[in-house]
Image: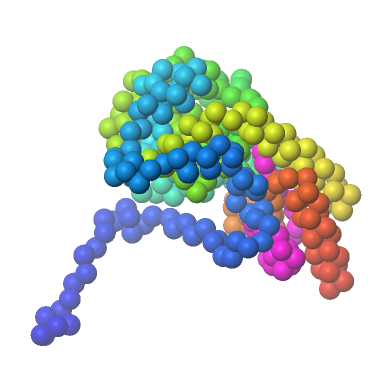
Amino acid sequence: MADGVAQISPRPRARVRAMMEYHPPLGSRDRLRLDFNENTLACSPKVGEALKAVTTAELTLYPAREPVEAIVAARLGLKPEQAALTNGVDEAIHVLFESFLEAGDELLLPVPTYTMYEVYASATEARVVAVQADDDLAFPFEKLLDAIGPRTKIIAVANPNSPSGSVATRAQLLELSARAPQAILLVDEAYFHFYGETVMDLVGQAPNLIVARTFSKAYGLAGLRLGLLAGPVELMQWVRRVLSPYSVNSLALVCLKAALDDDTYLDGYVSEVLAARDEFANALDAAGVRRWPSRANFILVEIGARHAEFVERMRAAGVLVRDRSRDPGCEGRVRITIGTREQMKQAALALNEALAAMRQGGNAQ
């Protein structure tokens, strides 16, 4: 109170007050970071070269996204107007939901899955319809079909999914698209490079299909925040109306062009991760740890009631892993990013030591 006058703070709109909050566990990152599904090595050396060539004069100019969008579109076999670069896939999801979700609409969401779908949906007037996967965490295809209704407006499918690493087949995605013509089918292919299968070639053919990609994972550009939405021109025109014209910065655009020019680096990194994933899966099996089959650059494992202790023991051993126990149906489960083979040998050693220490104090499972 000032001079006897009560101070009244401005209030945000009701929907913002009701929004889910998301707090990434951004602690010390000076350990082996197997908690965020990032590239654990480095981006292409060509990216560094491109950054060094940027002049200070260039930084005075607003970023020109369209020329780089045309390059990306051509690489994906798309028309430029079918593709929009975004400030990470997070912005892509946010803009898509803001463009299409209204009061009374429903977002159909197989869970567990990427948390930000529900976060951004909670900023709209739409209702989230969660479809719980079974204990095997396989894609709940039949349950999703049964959940489609007249108010279904968007169906969001991460493929491969996080945190499970499970996938939906092309036939299943096509069936979802056909069964819900009034809805957008968003297929988020953030982990495409570690899976190798895509529906990007169906963009423009399936009238309600929109595909998302990221350059944060295999390309190693997470710090620059680069994502992509691709879809029919008839849908993308509305996305572009909501999308900020300058949300992708100039340095990100320069680096993206350089990264796209280095297939040798990309292929080499992906091959290394796939080999490391197989070796680490074998190490988990040898340790008697339950795991879920994964087609992404991470593996979900069963730790049990002492999951928090396990995560802390791994951290103390220099390895960061992600506790997913708060995800629907994931109590006691921990997700471990796959890095290089050498990194995963370090992770396997830390895991075995953590489990052995936990067993000495009681059953770890």
Quick check: is 194 in the magenta stretch?
no
The location of residue 321, given as percent across then percent down, is 67, 57
Q: Is residue 64 left or right of residue 363?
A: left
Q: Is residue 102 left or right of residue 336?
A: left
Q: Is residue 87 left or right of residue 33?
A: left
In this rendering, the answer to whether 235 lies above or below 108 is above
Q: How is the image coloured?
A: rainbow
- The image quarter containing residue 281 is top right
In this rendering, the answer to whether 209 lies above or below 278 is above
Seen as rendered, the residue at the extreme right is 286
Seen as rendered, the residue at the extreme top is 205
Residue at the image position 35 percent from the left and 46 percent from the top: 56
Residue at the image position 83 percent from the left and 58 percent from the top: 349
> Quadrant of the image for the C terminus?
bottom right
Say if residue 290 shows up in the picture.
Answer: no
- The image quarter containing residue 131 is top right
Seen as rendered, the residue at the extreme bottom is 4
Say if residue 119 shows up in the picture.
Answer: yes
In this rendering, the answer to whether 18 lies above or below 222 is below
The location of residue 110, given as percent across then percent down, is 56, 39
Q: Nearer the viewer, residue 363 or 276?
A: 276
Residue at the image position 51 percent from the left and 21 percent from the top: 76
Task: Please state the total of marks drawn on the protein image.
Answer: 0
> Quadrant of the image for the N terminus?
bottom left
Quick check: is 319 in the magenta stretch?
yes
Q: Nearer the viewer, residue 276 or 264?
A: 264
The location of residue 108, given as percent across then percent down, is 48, 37
Q: What range of the chain is rendered magenta?
A: 295-323
Q: Is residue 6 left or right of residue 183?
A: left
